[in-house]
Amino acid sequence: MVAALDSLIVFVVGALVGGIGIHIGALVLSDARSYEHAVWTAVIGALAWLVASVLFGWLPLLGTVLTYLAYLGVIKWRYRGGWITAAGIALVGWLAASVVLSLLAAVGLGGFSALGVPGA
């Protein structure tokens, strides 16, 4: 029971941090909607990443590219703009989520990742 609760907490914190990153990216580069919209984008993006990774992750280099394109496709679908805007939102989102995760680690809450923000 405790492990399930821990997993749920990590999932929720990860989604909230991922949502912060995507929301900041959208504020800077697109038609930022609500923070809730960004959190759902993070969750959907994480699911797209997972599915693409399972299907294509075994392919050297191409698997990584296809997985990242699936993630960018979710951002492109959820926010106005093209592929370049989606990549910009992802980059700003990664930077913002990395800062938030660093701040959490500085106050002793390390070990989290940003759900829906690859590499953070």
Image (tube, rainbow, N blue to C red):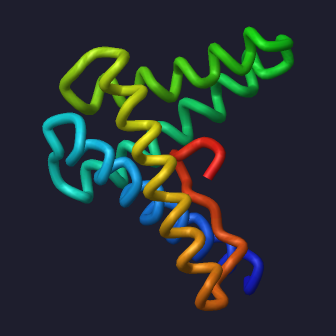
Q: Residue at x 30, y 53 (%)?
A: 24
The residue nearer to you, when weighing 49 against 21, is 21
Is 18 drawn above or below residue 4 in the view shown? Answer: above
**Above-or-below relation of 76 to 89:** above
Name the residue at the bottom extreme: 107
User: Residue 5's x, y, as percent?
Assistant: 65, 80
Q: Residue at x 19, y 26 (%)?
A: 80
Total marks drawn? 0
Q: Which of the 4 image quarters holds residue 36?
A: bottom left
Q: Which quadrant is home to the N terminus?
A: bottom right
Q: Is residue 23 above or below residue 90?
A: below
Question: 32 or 99: which is nearer to us?
Answer: 99
Q: Residue at x 58, y 76 (%)?
A: 9
Is residue 8 visible to us here?
no
Residue at x 60% of width, y 42% of height? 118
x, y (%) of residue 32?
17, 45
39 relative position to 2: left or right: left
Whether residue 38 is visible to the viewer of this picture, yes or no, is: yes
Q: Is residue 15 left or right of residue 89?
A: right
Q: Horizontally, is 51 left or right of 46 in the view? A: right
Residue 50, percent from left and from top: 65, 34
Up-down relation of residue 17 to residue 39 (above or below):
below
